């Protein structure tokens, strides 16, 4: 669901394709006819942002036809009644009207998901980058719990993560509410463990998300921002607004390997070391810890991220000294031993990768989470169903802005493209600039041809971009990526967020497209 | 030309975690192939993992700290950059409190650097205003 796997996670897509050839049934839920649909058993080409209508209808079919796992629900879940009440409205016919699907497709999908011996749901930002992103995820969890599709091989919920170490960064405590080892900051016992190790009293109040940081910047409450290896100016929604906010800062520190668009606005820029120049570990999308190694000698006047922070900390009165990355990792292993205690560098040399949690040296690592659900143990903590309702995208198309713009990634480029501008010599790149991908019928109605430059305008900004005519999108829907600073797509996107996660609605905003005379 | 040296590592792009073998010659990555022993990719790579590595050696890499003087970013020493940052952070903290400072951590950097990043924020600054690109 909402995963353009072949372009964003090509090697995972290869494994899915191979499994499909061996008989795995893949159902693709996506508003675009993405490449993965070629190997799919079924493509549910839903209208953008209508996932909950679809999932609630699937749940209702499963309930009405008695395809749910009664024993699992009784043993491990609560609030089943709430779920049954909430989805009653979502008949296949009602959901069909919202999603643009046929009722029969919804019914067939429900039967296939529930009747398979194991079903997995893999999703990406097509699920989370909506004003209702958290509700979308809740509903996926409802579906998995309803059918007991969790904690056994081939089942579960698999968010495919977008950066090499986005999982690890959060796990290491780079979250406003969490310490390293996924320990809640507001838990007195965990905090005490860190206070002892770090010899300091910690602030017990959860901090600000990036979204909240921008809000407080707008209110004049935030004065200093330290950005490491990120380019929020280009990556965040509503770029003109982001730029105005950054100008309000008293102090902007940027630590990066390039002078990014964000770094150009900084008061001070620190030259960091990149992949290939440092030692350490990454945590991948399925919780594998793996060793990354230094391959080349870095520039003499650059410094590694942790070295910079230790030197600054020491100068500011809190001395931090480590001789190498292994010493840091061993501190993590000691303090968050439940997760990483058994994952030494030495073991990683021999075993290549180990899945956390891995509390001690004799533990094999945890390949599958939540296996307790199938071990007939009394559940210590039951999983609640969290019923949710469909809410339409925040900015529907209208007469003035008749198209829905949805954004995403393309195969050869990566995020704000600061690195993928530098391909090895001789590599043929198909997409060398941004395009607005539009359906042939819409192009015909607008009188525009493939390769023509058009003006794309939203309530927040405008840009000029080349037209790509393709049946990958449906009439009324256009697609752009945010890779090129020359065509900063996020001047168009909408500054509306999920109230819980703070994730913006990158996947739907209204735009107008016009010919340039 | 020096002799090629092989270094095993993990890809730095998406979250799949493919194992790679880097061929290094004269302190430059000259070729990348998928690591057949890697459990995730078993020797495969995508176009980014195999070919989009020239950024490491790009001329546009930052080579010295920069500081803003009379509106322009100009080269400076680490000592001066550190002094500037330390004194400005102290100023903001004493005038507005530690809650007036936020940090955006890097989802591309190692676990070790990220651990130190949050430790810096929580100990030196005394704030939990730290987040990554989880929301974008």
Image (tube, rainbow, N blue to C red):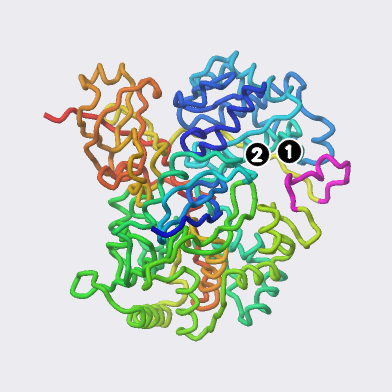
Q: Is residue A215 at all visible to an observer of this figure?
A: no
Earlier in the chain: of badge 1 and badge 2, it is 1
**Residue A376 is inside the magenta segment:** yes
Q: Position of residue A296 (x, y in %)?
A: 45, 62
Query: Which residue is labeled 2 in the image?
Result: A157
Asked if B59 appears above or below A136 in the picture, the reply is below
Answer yes or no: do the residues labelled 1 and 2 have beta carbons within 8 Å? Answer: yes
> Which stretch appears magenta?
A365-380
| Mark linked to residue A150 | 1
Q: Position of residue A22 (x, y in %)?
A: 66, 23
Badge 1: residue crowd in 10 Å (few <14, some 14–19, many ≥20): many
Q: Chain of mark 1?
A: A
Asked if A439 appears above or below A258 in the picture, the reply is above
Asked if A71 appears above or below B97 in the picture, the reply is above
Badge 2: residue crowd in 10 Å (few <14, some 14–19, many ≥20): some
**Residue A420 is inside the magenta segment:** no
Q: Is residue A49 at all visible to an observer of this figure?
A: yes
Taking the image as shown, residue A440 lies to the left or right of residue B128, namely left
Asked if A355 appears above or below A429 in the picture, the reply is below
């Amino acid at each position: 669901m909402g995963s353009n796997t072949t372009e964003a996670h090509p090697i995972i897509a290869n494994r899915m394709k191979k499994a499909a050839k061996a008989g795995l049934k893949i159902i693709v839920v996506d508003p675009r006819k993405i490449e993965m649909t070629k190997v799919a058993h079924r493509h549910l080409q839903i209208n953008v942002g209508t996932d909950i209508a679809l999932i609630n209808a699937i749940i209702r079919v499963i309930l009405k036809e008695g395809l749910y796992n009664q024993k699992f629900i009784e043993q491990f879940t609560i609030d089943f009644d709430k779920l049954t009440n909430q989805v009653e409205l979502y008949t296949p016919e009602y959901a069909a009207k919202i999603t643009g699907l046929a009722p029969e497709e919804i019914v067939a999908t429900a039967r296939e998901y529930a009747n398979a011996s194991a079903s997995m749901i893999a999703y990406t930002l097509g699920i989370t980058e909506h004003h209702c992103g958290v509700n979308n995820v809740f509903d996926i969890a409802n579906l998995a719990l309803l059918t007991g599709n969790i904690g056994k091989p081939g089942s579960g919920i698999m968010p495919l993560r977008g950066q090499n170490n986005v999982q690890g960064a959060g796990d290491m405590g780079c979250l406003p509410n969490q310490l390293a080892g996924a320990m809640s900051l507001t838990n007195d016992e965990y905090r005490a463990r860190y206070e002892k190790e770090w010899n300091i009293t910690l602030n017990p109040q959860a901090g600000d998300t990036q979204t909240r940081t921008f809000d407080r910047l707008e209110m004049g409450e935030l004065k200093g921002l330290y950005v490491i290896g990120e380019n929020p100016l280009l990556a965040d929604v509503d770029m003109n607004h982001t730029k105005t906010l950054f100008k309000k800062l008293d102090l902007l520190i940027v630590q990066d390997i390039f002078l990014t668009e964000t770094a150009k606005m900084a008061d001070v820029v620190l030259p960091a070391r990149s992949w290939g120049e440092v030692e350490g570990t990454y945590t991948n999308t399925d919780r594998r810890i793996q060793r990354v190694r230094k391959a080349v000698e870095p520039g003499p006047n650059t410094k590694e991220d942790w070295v910079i922070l230790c030197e600054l900390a020491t100068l500011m009165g809190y001395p931090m000294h480590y001789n190498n990355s292994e010493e840091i990792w061993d501190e993590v292993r000691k303090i968050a031993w439940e997760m990483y205690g058994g994952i030494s560098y030495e073991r990683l040399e021999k075993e290549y990768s180990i899945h956390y949690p891995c509390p001690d040296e004799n533990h094999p690592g945890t390949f599958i989470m939540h296996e307790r659900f199938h071990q007939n143990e009394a559940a210590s903590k039951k999983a609640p169903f969290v019923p949710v309702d469909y809410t339409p995208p925040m900015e529907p198309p209208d007469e003035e802005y008749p198209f829905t713009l949805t954004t995403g990634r393309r195969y050869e480029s990566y995020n704000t493209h600061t690195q993928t501008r530098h391909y090895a010599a001789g590599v043929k790149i198909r997409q060398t600039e941004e395009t607005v991908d539009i359906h042939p019928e819409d192009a015909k109605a607008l009188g525009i041809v493939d390769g023509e430059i058009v003006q794309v305008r939203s309530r927040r900004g405008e840009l000029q971009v080349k037209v790509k005519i393709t049946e990958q999108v449906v009439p009324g829907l256009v697609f752009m990526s945010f890779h090129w600073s020359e065509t900063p797509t996020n001047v168009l996107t909408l500054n509306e967020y999920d109230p819980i996660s703070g994730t913006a609605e990158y996947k739907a905003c209204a735009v107008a497209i016009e010919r340039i005379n | 030309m020096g002799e090629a040296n092989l270094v095993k590592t993990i890809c730095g792009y998406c979250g799949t975690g493919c194992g790679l073998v880097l061929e290094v010659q004269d302190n430059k990555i000259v070729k990348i192939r998928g690591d057949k022993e890697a459990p995730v990719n078993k020797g495969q790579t995508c176009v980014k993992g195999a070919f989009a590595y020239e950024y490491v050696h790009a001329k546009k890499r930052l080579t010295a700290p920069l500081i803003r003087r009379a509106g322009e970013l100009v080269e400076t020493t680490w000592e001066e950059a550190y002094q500037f940052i330390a004194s400005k952070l102290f100023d903001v903290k004493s005038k507005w409190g530690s809650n007036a400072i936020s940090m955006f951590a890097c989802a591309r950097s190692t676990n070790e650097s990220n651990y130190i990043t949050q430790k810096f924020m929580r100990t030196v600054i005394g704030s939990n205003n730290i987040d990554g690109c989880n929301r974008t």
